[in-house]
């Protein structure tokens, strides 16, 4: 055991004990944080406009502060971007995390001196929980790669602007700097495909022990490594034993990853976003990620099937239930108030509070009232893959309302690494798994409103072509798992 791994184990034990202090009193932790946030922001413009001085309870907060998304909060954000102080949070932010917007173009999410430390601690603590539970710390002696956006930043009215992953790159601890790849110069390459090729050249002869990134883009990196080296990843990197990921569910990719690597490796799931670091996998034995209730974020939850009703109930952490699909609402020490980030989550445990991400409130299929969500299609695909020899590179789902003939259906657009022996049987397995999860979809099949799903094979690289057409190839971008429209489906069909 090296000195570095020895001290990593000691540090892991200390940090886990520290985290246990709030984990055993989650409701009190959130209550105290709520009052602290209100107190600190009462003299901001937002606080004055929303009567923070009068807020004495969560009920008052619900009364005075409506749920907003970025478009609704934008008038305040625009003032912050223009350089004004004390608008959403005291003073001015340290950074703006720039993300892709929808109707309003680019989004500028403030990161403050109070919120930034939690972005850094989240990923660190996830690794430390892993070390403490498994006793495995040898990987700290090897090289680590984090596939991420460029660390280069611009400036707007005295505030630095960049991608969240690029901002976080400036906070890598000194003791990891020598272990970290790729180089600064390579990380600054904008074109994703050029960047991946450069990363391959920098890493192919190194002792890689930890690899981190969104699974779809790590998969591209692995494919290029195999092309260059002629070896499986596990043979090329003999000490690679830990994969850290976030952004999408890993399970649909796991089978192909194990084929590319040549063996199983441990994995840690993270839930970071520009708006905050929400959760991480704290155990290799339990399902879900630990929701971070002491990280500068006050959480509210709205049942997804009630979200678009008038005045839906906003639940606090002590009121949530297991296996209910919730829209996650946050108020943060970066000045986001009752903010809808667009994600839906489900609790897998309440002692401690662990969640899985089930999808996006705007990403669903309900062309006929079925309201199929991301979690359901991912689990259906995963179940079919476990019963088949097929391997999938990527997939998405769209409704086909007006087929040339026959009943409407759900179209599954799938890019296969290895096609199933019997494609029709594979489709039936997916369909059965989906019907088993979603009673509304099952009713539509039984009632002959929909026919069973149809799989469309996507040409190799087809989804990358779509992402490139949207300016979203690589980095922290990810393909929507499903949509209630045919934007992606129509693009893919035009490729064929």
Image (cartoon, helix red, strand yellow):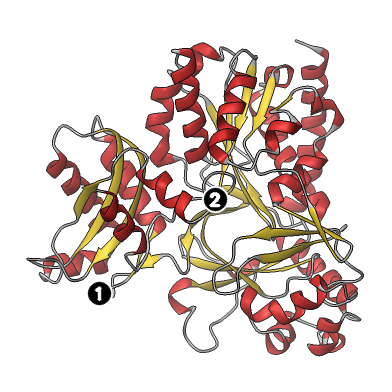
Q: Is residue 149 above or below residue 39?
A: above
Residue 37 picture quarter: bottom right
Earlier sequence position, callout 1 versus callout 2: 1
- What residue sits right under mark 2 in the picture? 477
The residue under the point 57% across, 34% down is: 194
Q: Is residue 273 left or right of residue 443?
A: right
Numbered tag placed on residue 131 in the rendering: none
Q: Residue 322 in the image: x percent, y percent?
A: 49, 60
- The mark lying in front, picked from 1 and 2, is 2
Q: Residue 170 in the image: x percent, y percent?
A: 81, 41
**What's the distance in space between the residues labelled 1 and 2, CA to CA?**
29 Å
Q: Is residue 315 above or below residue 349?
A: below
Q: Is residue 413 left or right of residue 343?
A: left
Q: Nearer the viewer, residue 281 or 250?
A: 250
Element class at badge 2: loop
Q: Residue 38 in the image: x percent, y percent?
A: 83, 76
- What residue sits right under mark 1 in the picture? 368
Q: Is residue 75 above or below residue 350?
A: below
């Amino acid at each position: 055991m090296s000195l570095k791994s020895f001290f990593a184990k000691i540090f892991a034990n200390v940090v886990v004990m520290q985290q246990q202090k709030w984990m055993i009193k989650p409701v009190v932790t959130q209550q105290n944080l709520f009052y602290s946030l209100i107190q600190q922001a009462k003299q901001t413009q937002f606080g004055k406009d929303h009567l923070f001085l009068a807020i004495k309870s969560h009920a008052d907060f619900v009364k005075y502060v409506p749920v907003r998304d970025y478009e609704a909060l934008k008038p305040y954000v625009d003032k912050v971007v223009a350089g004004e102080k004390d608008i959403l949070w005291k003073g001015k932010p340290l950074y703006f995390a720039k993300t892709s917007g929808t109707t309003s173009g680019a989004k500028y999410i403030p990161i403050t001196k109070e919120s930034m430390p939690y972005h850094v601690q989240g990923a660190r603590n996830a690794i430390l929980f892993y070390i403490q539970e498994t006793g495995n710390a040898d990987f700290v002696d090897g090289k680590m790669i984090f596939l991420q956006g460029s660390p280069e930043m611009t400036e707007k009215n005295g505030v630095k602007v960049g991608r969240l992953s690029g901002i976080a790159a400036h906070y890598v601890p000194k003791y990891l700097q020598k272990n970290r790849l790729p180089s600064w110069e390579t990380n600054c390459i904008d074109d994703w495909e050029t960047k991946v090729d450069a990363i391959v050249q920098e890493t192919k002869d190194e002792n890689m022990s930890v690899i981190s990134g969104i699974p779809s883009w790590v998969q591209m990196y692995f494919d290029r490594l195999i092309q260059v080296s002629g070896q499986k990843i596990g043979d090329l990197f003999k000490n690679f034993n830990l994969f850290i990921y976030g952004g999408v569910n890993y399970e649909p990719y796991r089978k192909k990853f194990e084929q590319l690597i040549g063996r199983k490796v441990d994995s840690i799931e993270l839930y970071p976003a520009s708006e905050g670091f929400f959760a991480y996998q704290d155990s290799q034995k339990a399902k879900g990620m630990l929701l971070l209730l002491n990280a500068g974020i006050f959480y509210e939850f709205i049942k997804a099937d009630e979200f678009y009703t008038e005045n839906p109930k906003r639940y606090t952490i002590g009121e949530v239930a297991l296996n209910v699909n919730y829209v996650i609402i946050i108020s943060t020490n970066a000045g986001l108030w009752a903010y809808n980030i667009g994600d839906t989550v489900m609790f897998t445990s309440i002692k401690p509070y662990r969640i899985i991400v089930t999808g996006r409130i705007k990403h669903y299929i309900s062309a006929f009232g079925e309201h199929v969500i991301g979690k359901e299609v991912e689990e259906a695909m995963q179940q079919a893959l476990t019963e088949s020899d097929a391997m999938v590179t990527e997939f998405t789902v769209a409704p086909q309302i007006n087929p040339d003939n026959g009943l409407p259906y759900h179209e599954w657009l799938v890019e296969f690494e290895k096609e199933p022996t019997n494609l029709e049987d594979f489709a039936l397995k997916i369909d059965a798994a989906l019907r088993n999860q979603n009673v509304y979809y099952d009713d539509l099949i039984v009632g002959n409103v929909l026919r069973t799903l149809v799989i469309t094979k996507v040409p190799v690289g087809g989804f990358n072509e779509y992402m490139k057409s949207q300016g979203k190839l690589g980095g922290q971008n990810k393909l929507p798992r499903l949509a209630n429209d045919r934007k992606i489906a129509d693009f893919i069909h035009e490729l064929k």
